[in-house]
Amino acid sequence: MRTTDNNKGNFVFNDDESYHVENLKKIGNQKIADIKIEQHPDLLVFPPTLGQHHDDIQNSSKIFSLHGHKLTTYNIMGFMGINDTQLTICSRFTKKEDGKDYFLHYMLQKVFAINIFKFDQTNDKENIWDFLLYLFPYFLKKAFAQGLYKEYKRNEYNNANVKGAIDVKRHIRTNLPFAGKIAYSTREYSYDNSITQLIRHTAEYIKTHKFGNGILTADSDMIAHINQLNYVTPSYNRNDRQRILHANNKPFVHPYFTEYKMLQKICLQILRYEKMTFGKEKDKIYGVLFDGAWLWEEYLNTILKDKFTHPENKTGKGKEYLFEENKQPIYPDFISKDKKIIADAKYKHSERSNDEYGREDYYQLIAYMYRFNSLNGFLLFPHAEKSFHEVLKIKETNGYLTKVGLHIPQEKNSFDDFKSEISPLETEFSEKITI
């Protein structure tokens, strides 16, 4: 089944689809925090730091609501399944009858710094695979930035250079009559372990995908990481894959190598892909979901990063404060480097002019403007029909609040056509965000 984000309840099940409704009830009408994602390791939600900071979308956002046979979506996009029910939530800018969601894939490629040559979107059942392909190199680089993971491993030796505990039984069994060798074992740090083996198996599996080799050789960093991975996993054997999966059944926990936790989850999903999407495990929830508001904000940062700083409200990086003595943290989405412009990204519909709609967004932006002594605030949102530009003067002040919409091309025949058309629109959009 396929619908779009923010669909205003326009997706209605037929009477003969009641079993899909029953399946989806297991996750519908719940806040993301209440789904207990840790109990569903095959359900990935991005950003992975949901709920850790002030916006707390984990506690306020639902994937969708169900009222009778009517399904209402919000800002969450992606793919999910439960039992034999599979639901794709596209961006609302998908208008082609074939349902190819170029805008969502474009944002993902920009945010995760992936450039797949000759890419075109796959069918519904492979959508989740496309998403995982974007995530693997991004989180591999984050993990390797912390260093190659190593852990203690017990190794057995039989030679004259004793440097560990002597294994008497093995020594008697293998070294009689005595010829100068002694059987012993040691605990040593090793880079060749269950985690690095899991990553290696994932990389080898990705190579078999039609876009896979391009992913692993997309830039010099990826090439270096894959070469390093191959070097430190000399015991790799394709036939060991099930054993390695079993060894990674428990979630990864380490006080320093924290980025490996998400990488482990992604690797497991990739290697279990077919079993996960076509299996029949009862009431198992699986999929990859993205918060559209976060994705839109991070995508805008790829366009505006030369002119604006970007406090990251999901990570706490770049935190500002409303009051002195560091009281009341605030997170304007974008602050120009001279602090004369404050901008907020809004993924939801923001093109309407009526005063009630978006009132809280206006209030929040004006508060940020006041905090930074700025006379210019911008609300930035995607627009389906055209590039949008509306200037609102704040009464009896010298301040202006400007709404700028980036036109999202639709009805394109290919992903390359989409990219060619949106590129100049991005330039035009950026140029409008000025004093």
Image (spheres, rainbow, N blue to C red):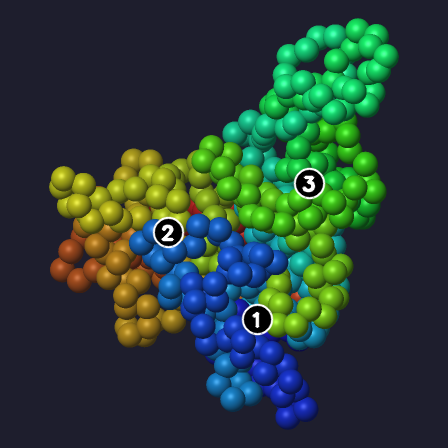
Mark 3 burial class by Cα count in 10 Å: few <14, some 14-19, many 20+: many
Whole-number angstrom distance, CA of label 2 to CA of label 1: 27 Å
Q: Amino acid at mark 2?
A: Gln
Q: Residue at x 82, y 45 (%)?
A: 208
Mark 2 / mark 1, whichever is N-terminal? 1
Which residue was labeled with disc 1?
4
In what element is the residue under mark 2? loop
Which residue was labeled with disc 2?
52
Asked if residue 182 is positioned above or below residue 386 in the image, the reply reads above
Tag 2 and tag 1, C-beta contact below 8 Å: no
Q: Position of residue 402 (x, y in %)?
A: 33, 57
Whole-number angstrom distance, CA of label 3 to CA of label 2: 28 Å
Tag 3 and tag 1, C-beta contact below 8 Å: no
Mark 3 / mark 2, whichever is N-terminal? 2
Mark 1 burial class by Cα count in 10 Å: few <14, some 14-19, many 20+: many
Asked if residue 63 is positioned above or below residue 251 in the image, the reply reads below
Q: Furthest residue to the right?
A: 177
Whole-number angstrom distance, CA of label 3 to CA of label 1: 34 Å
Quadrant including the C terminus: top left
> Mark 3 against mark 2, which lies toward the viewer?
3
- For this view, does 367 lie left or right of residue 86? left
Q: Position of residue 162 (x, y in %)?
A: 68, 11
Quadrant including the N terminus: bottom right
| Residue 198, numbered circle | 3
